[in-house]
Amino acid sequence: MRFLYSFLIMVSTPFVLLYFALRGLRDRAYLGHWNERFGFIPHPIQLRGIWVHAASVGEFNAACPLIKALLKTYPELPVMVSTLTPTGAQRVKKELGDQVSHSYIPIDLPGAVSRFLSRLQPRLVIVMETEIWPNLFLGINKLNIPLLMANARLSKRSTRRFSLISGLIKEALQSVTWVGAQSSTDEDRLLSCGVTPHRSVMTGNLKYDLLIPARLELEAATLRDGWNSERPVLVAGSTHEADENIVIPAFVELLTELPGALLILVPRYPERFSQSTQRALAAGLRTELRSQGESCSEQAQCFVIDSVGELMKYYACGDIAFVGGSMGDQGGHNALEPAALGKPVLLGPNMNNAKEIASQLLLCNAARRVTDQQGFRQTAKQLLTDTALRDSMGLAGRALVEKNKGALDLTLKAVRKLL
């Protein structure tokens, strides 16, 4: 089974590279570092440290408090963070700078994995969330390197997909030293796919342990002064095309009732910055760009954040927040960031990637579900005009985040044992 899997990965590799090349037409970051995709780690790099893999922005945001805690707890150990996407790489650089080194994770080919591990020689490997790569996991196990899965989750869809190669997935998961599952449902699915029971712990979600910079609210207040702090502000974060097809026309309608309102639009991927801007302009919105200044003018109706790594700051600037990826088939993005900042949250119908978080936010009345343009406009208007309701929802969101913290401590405890 492993031979067949490796053969299929090898056969599909040219198509993966073609995909990167096509993405590179819109985002040139995809055209670089291809040597790293085959295990050639950039030099110089420090050996015998901790390797943390976080595929993209969402996984890195969850991993960030853990990485910062590792840097503080083990200052003598170098930390290397790998990502799959350039947006993830940009977040690593922006958030951690020279405190860590970075490489792209190799394609899951035996040779690339072996080359990567022999060059890095990690003492401990931490893989975030759903990144299960059989050749990588088995290669780590062969070298007797402790492997920890942090914030692990497994969707029903992934479970069905893994059943097609159940023997290989079971072998890979049995090589994991410790698994910290986001929920009891995730733990049950991981156990059914092969995780060894005594190596599994239900830690809760690391995303609840997110770090909010002490100066964030002051920075947000300063930014708001630039566009008149009394304006009602809606932040649409991590948006995709399907989200903007609802949010932008709904906001245009909202302006007839709240003419002073401002939409802060934060596209999920850099290659969508231009498309999102054009969509706002085509809708007739007076649109300004983050690349032209940190704040917008009082005349702006839409402020497009065409930068990476600033979503939390602009969530803090808003009165209410819509979480993108939830109107289409992306499965939704991190709704805890605005909740932790005390912002009422709007969610689309598809939060499959964070069902439990979405359910908890809705249950404690920190969030509202919106399914179409009319519902979005009505809910946004209600929240932007009802200060008492906004405050109560914001307090409920903050309380939920505080109540569910603790995954970071449990994960660090496991790291201490494995080291």
Image (spheres, helix red, strand yellow):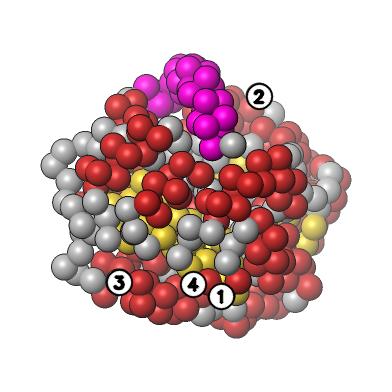
Which residue range is magenta in the image?
2-31
For label 1, count other residues whose C-alpha is less than 10 Å away and answer few (under 14), some (14-19) or many (20+): few
Earlier-in-chain disc, 2 versus 1: 1
In this rendering, the answer to whether 142 lies above or below 327 is: below
Which residue lies under the disc numbered 4?
A: 209
Instruction: Kindly identify the amino acid type of the residue bearing the numbered disc 3.
Output: Leu
- State the residue at coordinates (67%, 78%): 396
Which residue lies under the disc numbered 1?
A: 198
Is the residue under label 1 in contact with that under label 4 (CB below 8 Å)?
no
Instruction: Kindly identify the amino acid type of the residue bearing the numbered disc 2.
Output: Ala
Q: Secondary structure at mark 2?
A: helix
Earlier-in-chain disc, 4 versus 1: 1
Which residue lies under the disc numbered 3?
A: 419
Task: Give the CA separation, mark 2 to mark 1.
Answer: 57 Å
- Select label 4 or label 1 by which is in front: 1
- Select label 4 or label 3 by which is in front: 3
For label 3, count other residues whose C-alpha is less than 10 Å away and answer few (under 14), some (14-19) or many (20+): few
Q: Can residue 121 be seen in the rendering of this structure? A: yes
- Select label 3 or label 2 by which is in front: 3
Which residue lies under the disc numbered 2?
A: 282
Q: Is residue 49 left or right of residue 221?
A: left
- State the residue at coordinates (36%, 39%): 113
Task: Give the CA separation, mark 4 to mark 3.
Answer: 22 Å
Q: Is residue 291 left or right of residue 279?
A: left
